[in-house]
Amino acid sequence: MAMNNTATSLWERQPQARISLWKALEFFEAAYRARNLSPHTIAWYKQRLTPFVSNLQGRLEREPTLADLDIGGFRFFILEKQSEGKYRDHRFKRPSEEPPSAGHIHGFYRAVRGFSSWLFDEGLVPVNIMASLKMPKLEEKELQPLTTAEELKLLNAYSELKPGECRDKALFMLMLSTGLRRAEILRLKAAAVNIDEGFITVWGKGKKQRSIPFGHKVGWVLQRYTLLHRPELATPNVGEFFLNRDGYPMTVASFEMTFKRAAKKTGIARLHPHLLRHTYGTRSSELGIPTLTLQRFMGHSQPSVTERYSHVATNERLKRERSYDHLDGLDLRVRRPRG
């Protein structure tokens, strides 16, 4: 809901209208920390709201206040973002001339709307300024899991017998067997990996705990890593399961580098962490795991998200079942088109 000119004029005279947007961002971050939201969630908002406020400050040529927050200013920011190349501020990927993805732009909308709602709920602004901001439509892309051949290629490229490769093989196998997210695999505690019983316990989004089973072959590789190749702890306080060679927990940077090296080693250029999660969801659905069970294993808040994997699994089955067509087995003379 927008304010009329009179209401806007009255609002701009109020003390809170002169609060710096930078200070408001600090309040916002503190409030989310007090709510015990994950550092990942807080960082997600910060990475999207900071460029917006910086952009506004650059255009105003002064420090922006709450009175400067409006939809028009945000749209100018989005136009500039859309003209930038892909991965401009990414920590691990090289900048590209391609425009940013729709999902990347969508994130800025979600962040600024969340910030605006919080300002209104806290009584810092008289109306939810961004409430009428329409979200851009996202193209529904079909998930493309790893093929069985690609799974084998990835896992067979590493030997659990070699100290330098055992950790990476254990990492890939556990992700393919449980569908863990990046943050979940990095936070996974050694005490939460029950190799004897074949399950792990993780804390996912929204601080929700869940347990996920894994198979015998995964257990064998995890056991070899634990007993023979896991480094000595750098300090007694280290409790994470996957460690770097120095005995400290695996970092985001080393995790991303592990996948980058694996993509180069296997020739699977599209390899990335979430692809393993998609593959787990698809294979589990193919095996007939009920949607509600799979939803619990994957930590989805809505069954509609999990149901996407049923659709992908159906398509994967159709691709394989194409070979069942009896006409392809007949000595039938049909010329294949060229090109």
Image (cartoon, rainbow, N blue to C red):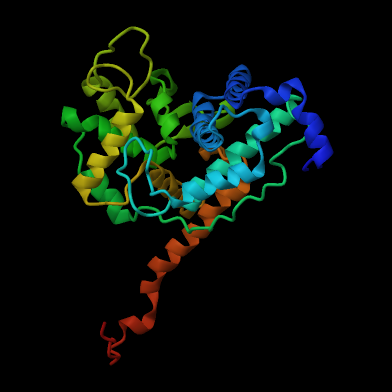
Viewer-proximal residue among 39 and 64: 64
Quadrant placement of the C terminus: bottom left
Q: Tell me residue 247's x, y (percent).
A: 26, 16
Q: Would you place residue 160 above or below residue 291 in this image?
A: above
* Residue at 27% across, 51% down: 269
- Asked whether, in this view, residue 249 is left or right of residue 160, the answer is right
Is 118 left, or right, of 169 in this rendering?
right
Q: Is there any visible trace of residue 280 in the rendered image?
A: yes
Residue projecting furthest to the bottom: 333
Q: Residue furthest left?
A: 162
Q: In terms of depth relative to the viewer, which is nearer, 252 or 208? A: 252
Q: Residue at x 58, y 37 (%)?
A: 111
Image spot of residue 276 (x, y percent): 38, 44
Q: Is residue 292 above or below residue 25?
A: below
* Residue ranking furthest to the front: 61
Q: Residue 11, position in %: x, y?
A: 78, 30
- Compared with 64, 305 (above or below) is below
**Count of numbered marks:** 0
Position above or below: 58 against 229: below
Residue 217 can be seen, yes or no? no
Q: Is residue 207 left or right of residue 242?
A: right
User: For the point 52% across and 38% down, which residue is it?
Assistant: 297
* Image quadrant where one finds the N terminus: top right
Q: Nearest the camera: 143 or 24?
A: 24
Of all residues shown, which one is farthest toward the right? Answer: 6
Q: Position of residue 291 (x, y in %)?
A: 58, 48
